[in-house]
């Protein structure tokens, strides 16, 4: 008889534990037996119960019970009807039941899909390989952030294969919206680059087209550089890109400070070109602000730190053009190793033979 009150207390405690569920909880909460029979669900869990086509006393999917036996804190992700839930499954063996706490992650999954679509869209804009142009060594790379920005670059080669124009652009905005605008800007660039052979005219035409097509709060910064190896000249126009192209010659680093307003803002803005005479051995870098503006733990921008100039001044003449790009991008990433990359990193390098 001495054990009877204890047994009654244990039963009371178990009943209290079973019934102790705040029904106002906005997330689904379910309780099942250790072998998977449904004991309880709150109002938010009714949708799950209906989609699983079960009632009190029926078995839940076996994967839920299996999850409770795993020594893992990771949630079980399942599609339920037209929604996706993350279930935290917690066994309570002292009371012979399992708690299931659900979170509707449908919006997160849709966002992940949108980011995947944006990434694929952005990657489709990038050249598969660098072109072979007599007298020039060329390569480019773009490293996207998790949020996906709107960076892109392109190679536009003349019909006689003697000239090449290189565009490096950065569309404002991130995610699918930024990627879609990058696709539009890249397409417009190709149309006018085929029709015209003057960087200023191409920029002006792109600008007018984007002013008509792009939302008012969006714009595109772009550098367009045309290389003529026969003349040993680079003709460059800049639309709002603050990361100026850099000319590295005999160990010295000089910015090419061509200026202009970002594309897609004012349709009547003219764009002026800057002509740079080239020499054998010159190295030219075209980039977005993902190279120059990343900050370290102290809040100092990469370019302001002097580290970029130091790296460029010490690049050996025999280093391959691909190694040049890889070295710079690796150093930018190392500089901001403690912080998550928040902007695309895009760089195209050209060496004059």
Image (tube, grey):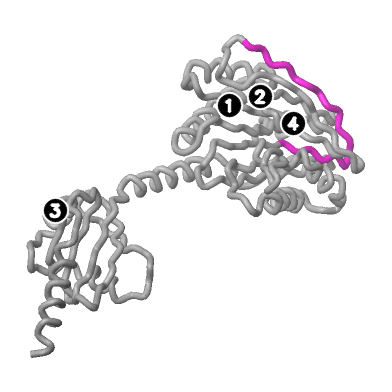
Q: Please name which of the two marks, 3 or 2, marks the residue nearer to the observer.
A: 3
Instruction: From this view, report whether residue 294 is shown above or below residue 215.
Output: below
Q: Quadrant of the N terminus?
A: bottom left
Binning the other alpha carbons within 10 Å of mark 2 as few (below 14), some (14 to 19) or many (20 upward) gives: many
Instruction: Pick out the residue farthest to the right.
Output: 250
Instruction: From this view, report whether residue 117 is shown above or below residue 247.
Output: below
- Residue 2 seen in this snapshot: yes
Give the CA distance from mark 4 to mark 2: 9 Å
The residue to which callout 4 is attached is 244
**Which labelled disc corresponds to residue 46?**
3
The residue to which callout 2 is attached is 240
Q: Residue at x 33, y 45 (%)?
A: 107
**Which labelled disc corresponds to residue 97?**
none
Q: Residue at x 18, y 61 (%)?
A: 20
Q: Quadrant of the C terminus?
A: top right
The residue to which callout 1 is attached is 220
Residue 215 in percent (x, y) is at: 46, 21
- Residue 347 seen in this snapshot: no
Q: Please name which of the two marks, 3 or 1, marks the residue nearer to the observer.
A: 3
Give the residues in magenta.
Answer: 269-286
Give the CA distance from mark 1 to mark 2: 8 Å
Give the CA distance from mark 3 to mark 2: 55 Å
Q: Is residue 277 magenta?
A: yes
Under tag 2, what secondary structure?
Answer: loop
| Label 3 or label 2, whichever comes before in sequence order | 3
Instruction: Pick out the residue farthest to the bottom.
Output: 1
Q: Nearer the viewer, residue 324 or 71?
A: 71
Q: Are marks 3 and 1 in contact (CB under 8 Å)?
A: no
Give the CA distance from mark 3 to mark 1: 48 Å
Give the CA distance from mark 3 to mark 4: 59 Å
């Amino acid at each position: 008889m001495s054990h009877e009150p204890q047994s009654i207390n244990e039963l009371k405690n178990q009943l209290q534990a079973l019934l102790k569920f705040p029904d106002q909880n906005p997330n689904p909460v379910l309780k099942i037996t250790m072998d998977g029979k449904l004991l309880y669900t709150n109002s938010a869990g009714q949708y799950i119960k209906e989609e699983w086509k079960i009632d009190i006393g029926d078995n839940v999917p076996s994967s839920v019970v299996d999850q409770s036996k795993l020594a893992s804190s990771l949630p079980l992700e399942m599609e339920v009807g037209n929604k996706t839930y993350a279930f935290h499954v917690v066994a309570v063996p002292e009371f012979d039941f399992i708690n299931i706490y659900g979170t509707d992650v449908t919006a997160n999954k849709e966002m992940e899909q949108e980011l995947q679509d944006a990434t694929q869209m952005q990657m489709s804009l990038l050249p598969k390989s660098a072109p072979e142009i007599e007298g020039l060594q060329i390569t480019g790379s773009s490293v996207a952030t998790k949020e996906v920005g709107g960076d892109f670059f392109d190679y536009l080669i003349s019909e006689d294969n003697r000239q090449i124009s290189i565009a490096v652009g950065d569309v404002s905005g991130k995610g699918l919206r930024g990627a879609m605008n990058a696709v539009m800007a890249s397409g417009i660039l190709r149309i006018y680059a085929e029709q015209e052979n003057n960087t200023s005219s191409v920029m002006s035409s792109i600008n007018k087209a984007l002013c008509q097509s792009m939302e008012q709060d969006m714009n595109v910064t772009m550098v367009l550089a045309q290389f003529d190896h026969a003349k040993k000249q680079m003709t460059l126009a800049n639309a709002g890109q603050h990361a100026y192209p850099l000319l590295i010659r005999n160990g010295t680093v000089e910015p090419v400070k061509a200026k202009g307003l970002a594309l897609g803002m004012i349709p009547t803005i003219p764009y002026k070109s800057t002509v740079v005479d080239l020499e054998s051995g010159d190295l030219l870098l075209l980039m977005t602000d993902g190279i120059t503006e990343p900050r370290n733990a102290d809040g100092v921008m990469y370019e302001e730190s002097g580290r970029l100039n130091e790296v460029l001044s010490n690049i050996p003449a025999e280093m391959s053009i691909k190694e040049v790009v890889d070295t710079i991008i690796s150093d930018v990433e190392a500089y901001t190793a403690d912080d998550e990359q928040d902007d695309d990193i895009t760089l195209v390098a050209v060496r004059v033979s």
